[in-house]
Image (cartoon, rainbow, N blue to C red):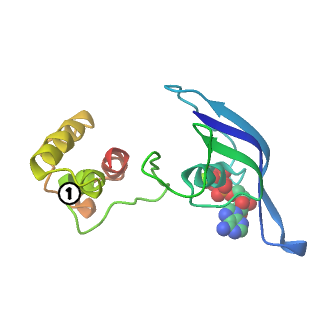
Amino acid sequence: MLNITNLSKTFGDGANTVTAVDHVDMHVGKGELAVVVGPSGCGKSTLLNIVAGLETKTSGDARIMGRDIQGPGADRGMVFQSYTLFPWLTVQKNVEFGLRIKNMQAKERADIAQQYIRLVGLEGREKALPKELSGGMKQRVARQR
Ligand SMILES: Nc1ncnc2c1ncn2[C@@H]1O[C@H](COP(=O)(O)OP(=O)(O)OP(=O)(O)O)[C@@H](O)[C@H]1O
Ligand SMILES: [Mg+2]
């Protein structure tokens, strides 16, 4: 599913060069759960940003189902370190956002959103705005989007 081979990423140039990802290999199969662990600044977010297509690699290979990652796509989702909910949309509307992008009808959208809202224990908070939620609640809504 995900094949990362000999992947490197450097930021800056000359004396200011920072090597964020240094010849990393990672292979994740369908249905597998992978965890990247390491000290602050070791390159975890940079690696994930490359997989998400939000950051370009310097060298090596990053493929999803055999296809070279060229940019972001609907086949990958990301929960960012900082909260990334749309602050002007309710919990329900935030969760529905991805389905709206896919042009799904309102009723079907609402049904699916309801399922996921229930899954993360936020039933009854559908109409809440992100600023009214705790940090953990915000992350759980972002995870469903
Ligand atoms: N846009 C950037 N420009 C320059 N250096 C960067 C940039 N992004 C990350 N870095 C550097 O790359 C290295 C890896 O950063 P990264 O954010 O990937 O670490 P991390 O493992 O996610 O850390 P944390 O656990 O603190 O979130 C760090 O030295 C960081 O300063
Ligand atoms: Mg990080």
Residue 85 x, y percent position in the rendering: 33, 60
| Residue on which disc 1 sits | 93
Other-residue count near label 1 (Cα within 10 Å), few / some / many at <14 / 14–19 / ≥20? many
Residue 104 x, y percent position in the rendering: 20, 50
Corner quadrant of residue 35? top right
Residue 4 x, y percent position in the rendering: 70, 40
Q: Is residue 108 left or right of residue 66?
A: left
Q: Is residue 66 left or right of residue 83?
A: right
Image point (20%, 44%), residue name: 113
* Viewer-closest of 68 and 141: 68
Image point (78%, 72%), residue name: 12
Spot the residue most to the front: 67
Quarter that holds the N terminus? top right
The quadrant of the rendered image in which ligand 1 is seen is bottom right
Above or below for 24 versus 92:
above
Mark 1 vs ligand 2: CB below 8 Å: no
Q: Is residue 32 left or right of residue 121?
A: right
Image point (59%, 55%), residue name: 49
Q: Is residue 46 left or right of residue 107?
A: right
The kind of residue tagged 1 is Lys
Above or below for 132 versus 65:
below
Image point (36%, 53%), residue name: 135
Residue 20 x, y percent position in the rendering: 75, 56
